[in-house]
């Protein structure tokens, strides 16, 4: 495996379900990110982790819960989602810890549908 | 408040033509100006980027033009090919944040 991988690629869940998205980066990077991509809206940064510590949480509802057990893995735990949470969820990583993320490397995303 | 304004929203170009996508910004803290390319079913990937100490950078068929006084930068795709059909985003960073534009869907018709 190379680059940034995400599983599952597609997910359909009911509003009462609990599910998790997984991201793994094979680039030796120190920072990882979750983004939400909805139609006709700019990519929204959700969470940033640097060396496994959360450094940013952009007013994301508590029904989204991130977890970063090590610098290669990032999870997004989902529970009691709403239909408007249906979107493409992208994971990304970047090399440094200096607080600058000039270039980010993205995974292919998980297409989430909430019924 | 949107940090960058990208235009056009969509663009259709004949094969061999020139595609031009623009990005205007307000935040003077931006000091790195990248363009990302996203194909269906894939995440965005860095295509080309420029720093403000130069006004133009060319990589193959892709050129970034940067106008500091106008606070604008643009992506030019010369000799556009059907394989260039994708969505393009400007995404200047500040700190950990990439400030993505709304994207331009480019379609190159044979």
Image (cartoon, coloured by chain):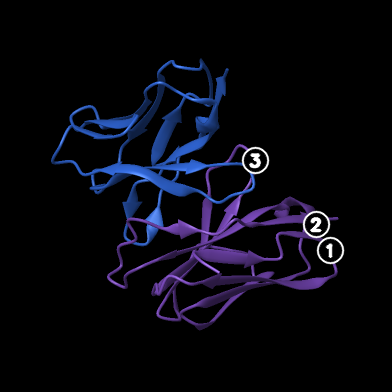
The answer to whether A81 appears left or right of B16 in the picture is right
Give the answer, above or below, for where A88 lies relative to A92: above
Q: Which mark is residue A39?
A: 3
Front position in the image: A79 or A37: A37
Mark-to-mark CA distance, 1 and 3: 21 Å
**Residue pushed farthest bottom?**
A69
Real-space Cα distance between discs 2 and 1? 6 Å
Q: Chain of mark 3?
A: A
Residue A53 visible in the shown view: yes
CB under 8 Å between callouts 2 and 3?
A: no
> What's the distance in space between the residues labelled 2 and 3, CA to CA?
15 Å
Earlier in the chain: of badge 2 and badge 1, it is: 1
Q: Please name the color used to draw chain A.
A: purple
Q: Is residue A81 above or below residue B30?
A: below
Q: Residue A107 appears in which quarter of the rendering?
A: bottom right
Picture quarter with the C terminus of chain A: bottom right
The front one of A63 and A67 is: A67
Q: Quadrant of residue B20?
A: top left
Chain B painted colour: blue
Q: Indicate which disc residue A15 carries.
A: 1
Q: Secondary structure beneath disc 3?
A: loop
Disc marking residue A114: 2
| Residues at discs 1 and 3 in contact (Cβ within 8 Å) | no
Circles 1 and 3 on the same chain: yes
The chain that hosts pointer 1 is A
Image point (50%, 31%), residue name:
B84
Q: Position of residue B34 (x, y in %)?
A: 34, 44
Q: For the N terminus of chain A, give its image quadrant.
A: bottom right
Q: Residue A109, image x and y in percent?
A: 62, 57
SS label for mark 1: loop
Q: In the visual, does A115 lie left or right of B53?
A: right
Q: Are marks 2 and 1 in contact (CB under 8 Å)?
A: yes
């Amino acid at each position: 495996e190379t680059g940034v991988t995400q599983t599952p690629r597609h997910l359909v869940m009911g509003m009462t379900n609990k599910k998790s998205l997984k991201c793994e980066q094979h680039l030796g990077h120190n920072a990882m990110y979750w983004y939400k991509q909805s139609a006709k809206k700019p990519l929204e940064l959700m969470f940033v982790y640097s060396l496994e510590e959360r450094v940013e949480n952009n007013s994301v509802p508590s029904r989204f819960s991130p977890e970063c057990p090590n610098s290669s893995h990032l999870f997004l735990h989902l529970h009691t989602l709403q239909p408007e949470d249906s979107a493409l969820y992208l994971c990304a990583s970047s090399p440094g810890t200096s607080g600058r993320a000039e270039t980010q490397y993205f995974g292919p995303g998980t297409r989430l549908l909430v019924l | 408040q949107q940090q960058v304004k990208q235009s056009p929203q969509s663009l259709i170009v004949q094969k061999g033509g020139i595609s031009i996508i623009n990005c205007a910004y307000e935040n003077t803290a931006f000091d790195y100006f990248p363009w990302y390319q996203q194909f269906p079913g894939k995440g965005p990937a860095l295509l080309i980027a420029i720093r403000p100490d130069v006004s133009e950078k060319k990589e193959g068929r892709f050129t970034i033009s940067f106008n500091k006084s106008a606070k604008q930068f643009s992506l030019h795709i010369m000799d556009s090919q059907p394989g260039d059909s994708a969505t393009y985003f400007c995404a200047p960073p500040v700190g950990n944040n990439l400030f993505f534009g709304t994207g331009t869907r480019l379609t190159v018709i044979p």
